[in-house]
């Protein structure tokens, strides 16, 4: 494979700025369409289906996008992904402007966008290796996480304001415009992204996919690392699904919004710290410490109904996540050859996100039928644990958070003892010497 040797952090920043603007636009549409669906039907199911159709296709098809990112020009794949994602929004905008839109039409539109996001994401992830030196990997990872978290901090606030002064059609136009910005940024970088050789183009598609899996499975350290991250996302899925019902059980939606915004600030601050300053090369140690800190903060979320305490714990929890993600990102990036990184990130994408899918499937059942009954008045644990963390609505979810946090800390302890993960760091250090 022909690799362009002209590494440039400035060119990475150009691509990153375009993707961050696009990420904010995606967040605007996700928030606005969810509100639109709920107001149209007054059911949570309709809004949840929008989330499902905008999430699941991109995850399931990400390995395919990874293979294509290694076969073809990653710059072209990013452009096609952004164009296709914008096409899905154009479809929704068209049906809104021409008549009374039905929810199934919105589902089709967001599904189209999600399918093409599967092409863009692995190419974008792999392109960082093309443009950054190994010493810049951690900074790049921190900035990528900052762009991703922007849609959680800025987009809901902006979308809420825009919905109060304009129609949803105008918000869709804004999002479509942000994709245009992302495409222009990639075009500006031109040939500084990976190109593909004829030999790779002629390989069988399934062979390419198998090579990506072999690159992961042949390294015990990487396979275990991906497994650990999948478990972490499983617990994170509980938080995403149940923090709303827990807070709303004793407070209101405004407080929930405050919690989300303040917590997202913690993630942004940590991402900025990683992106601006040089982080220690002891990434395996940073991974373990980040997991311990995240697990402790997770447990603190369920300890009390004091809102200030909960908001503070949420801030600390999301502050820890960028250190976990950056450590895993750099350890994988340093130990996988560049020509296979598209496939590898595509496969890792689906494996790591499976934790979310499982958590989304079981969280509601566990909360409503297992944990909440234990801490309702007269519940089995009300006289014991209930004396410490309280009883009543939502306290069972609090107990679930405490247990999940402890399990994350135990997982951190296990991770610290895994030599194959430490060797990922040592092998890179030996190569760099």
Image (cartoon, rainbow, N blue to C red):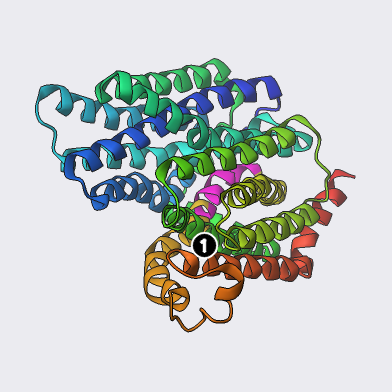
Q: Would residue 137 be seen by someone viewing this image from the given angle? A: yes
Name of the residue lying farthest toward the bottom: 380
Q: Would residue 8 be seen by someone viewing this image from the given angle? A: no
Q: Is residue 343 magenta?
A: yes
Q: Return the x and y of residue 176 as percentages of the image width and height.
A: 35, 22
Q: Is residue 25 left or right of residue 277?
A: left
Q: Return the x and y of residue 187 as percentages of the image width and height.
A: 50, 18
Which one is nearer the viewer's eye here, 138 or 381? 381
The residue positioned 63% from the left and 25% from the top of the image is: 12
The residue positioned 64% from the left and 40% from the top of the image is: 266
Which one is nearer the viewer's eye here, 167 or 252? 252
The residue positioned 51% from the left and 54% from the top of the image is: 347
Dot 1 corresponds to which residue?
234
Residue 217's place in the image compared with 153, above or below, is below
Secondary structure under tag 1 reads: helix
Q: Return the x and y of residue 345 as percentages of the image width and height.
A: 55, 48
Q: Which residues are magenta?
A: 338-348
Instruction: Count how many numbered circles sit on residues in the image.
Output: 1
Which one is nearer the viewer's eye here, 190 or 332? 332
Which one is nearer the viewer's eye here, 414 or 45? 45
Name of the residue lying farthest toward the left: 99
């Amino acid at each position: 494979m022909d690799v362009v040797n002209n590494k440039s952090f400035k060119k990475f920043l150009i691509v990153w700025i375009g993707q961050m603007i696009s990420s904010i636009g995606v967040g605007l549409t996700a928030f606005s369409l969810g509100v639109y669906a709920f107001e149209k039907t007054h059911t949570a199911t309709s809004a949840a289906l929008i989330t499902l159709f905008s999430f699941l296709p991109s995850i399931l098809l990400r390995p395919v996008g990874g293979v294509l990112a290694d076969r073809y020009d990653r710059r072209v794949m990013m452009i096609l992904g952004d164009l296709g994602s914008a096409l899905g929004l154009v479809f929704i905008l068209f049906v809104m402007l021409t008549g009374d839109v039905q929810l199934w039409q919105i589902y089709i539109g967001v599904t189209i966008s999600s399918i093409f996001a599967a092409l863009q994401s692995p190419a974008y992830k792999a392109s960082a290796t093309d443009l950054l030196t190994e010493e810049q990997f951690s900074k790049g990872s921190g900035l990528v996480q900052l762009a991703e978290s922007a849609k959680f901090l800025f987009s809901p606030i902006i979308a809420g304001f825009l919905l109060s002064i304009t129609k949803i059609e105008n918000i869709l136009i804004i999002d479509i415009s942000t994709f245009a910005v992302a495409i222009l940024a990639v075009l500006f970088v031109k040939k500084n992204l990976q190109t593909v050789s004829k030999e790779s183009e002629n390989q069988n598609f399934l062979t390419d996919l198998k090579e990506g899996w072999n690159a992961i499975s042949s390294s015990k350290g990487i396979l275990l690392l991906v497994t650990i991250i999948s478990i972490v996302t499983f617990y994170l899925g509980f938080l995403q699904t149940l923090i709303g019902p827990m807070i709303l059980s004793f407070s209101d939606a405004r407080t929930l919004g405050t919690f989300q915004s303040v917590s997202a600030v913690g993630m942004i601050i940590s991402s900025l710290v990683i992106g601006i300053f040089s982080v220690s090369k002891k990434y395996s140690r940073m991974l373990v410490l980040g997991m311990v800190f995240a697990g402790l903060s997770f447990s603190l979320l369920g300890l009390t109904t004091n809102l200030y305490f909960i908001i503070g714990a949420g801030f600390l929890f999301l502050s820890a996540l960028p250190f976990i993600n950056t450590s895993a990102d750099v350890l994988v990036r340093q130990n996988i050859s560049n020509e296979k990184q598209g496939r590898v990130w595509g496969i890792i994408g689906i494996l790591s996100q499976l934790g979310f899918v499982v958590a989304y499937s079981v969280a509601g059942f566990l909360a409503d039928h297992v944990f909440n009954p234990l801490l309702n008045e007269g519940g089995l644990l009300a006289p014991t644990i209930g004396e410490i963390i309280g009883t009543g609505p939502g306290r069972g979810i609090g107990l679930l958070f405490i247990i999940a946090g402890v399990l994350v800390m135990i997982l951190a302890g296990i991770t610290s003892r895994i030599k194959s993960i430490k060797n990922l760091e040592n092998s890179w250090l030996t190569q760099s010497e």
